[in-house]
Amino acid sequence: MSLYKRGDVWWYKFMWRGELIRESAKQSNKRVAEQIEAGRKTQMAKGEAGIKDQVKCPTLNEFATGSLLPFVAQHNKAKPKTVEFYKSRVELIKTFQRI
């Protein structure tokens, strides 16, 4: 592991598939910086093997308020009843209890 200090912060550098990787660990503790470097190498190896970290699936509420309703409002500006329909249905779905 090739750690070096710049100011109060530890940095690491290593070769990955012929490319020099040089990044800040953003840590003043050397042991933590070593763990971050090892984690970065593991992350790169997983990506190389096609293993991706699992993306968290949004809840229905997050999807509806974050993506669905803004999309409907933007694409149906001339149809206020359509927008109101989607808003009312989302509110209705929110009333159901989780199982």
Image (cartoon, rainbow, N blue to C red):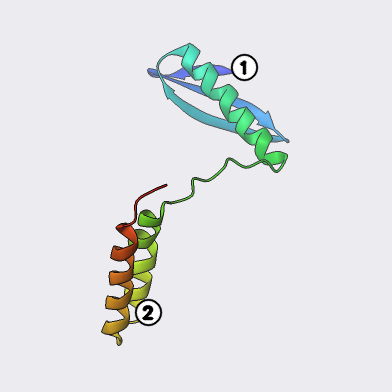
Q: Are marks 1 and 2 in contact (CB under 8 Å)?
A: no
Vertical order, 22 against 91 (above or below): above
12 vs 94, left or right, is: right
Tell me where residue 25 appears, x and y as whole percent: 47, 25
- Please state which of the two labelled residues, at mark 1 or mark 2, is closer to the viewer: 2
Tell me where residue 45 appears, x and y as whole percent: 68, 33
| Residue with the mark numbered 2 | 75
| Residue with the mark numbered 1 | 1
Q: Residue at x 49, y 19 (%)?
A: 33
Q: Residue at x 62, y 28 (%)?
A: 41
Tell me where residue 94 appears, x and y as whole percent: 31, 58
Amino acid tagged 2? His
Q: Residue at x 34, y 56 (%)?
A: 96
* Relative depth, front residue between 22 and 86: 86
Which quadrant of the view contains residue 7?
A: top left
74 vs 36, left or right, is: left
* Relative depth, front residue between 23 and 96: 96
Amino acid tagged 1? Met
Residue furthest out toward the bottom:
78
Q: CA distance from mark 1 to mark 2?
A: 53 Å
Which secondary structure, mark 1?
loop
Tell me where residue 43 appears, x and y as whole percent: 61, 33
80 vs 60, left or right, is: left
48 vs 4, left or right, is: right
Q: Residue at x 35, y 56 (%)?
A: 61
Which quadrant of the view contains residue 39?
A: top right
Vertical order, 22 against 72 (above or below): above
Which callout, 1 or 2, points at the residue further toward the start of the chain? Answer: 1
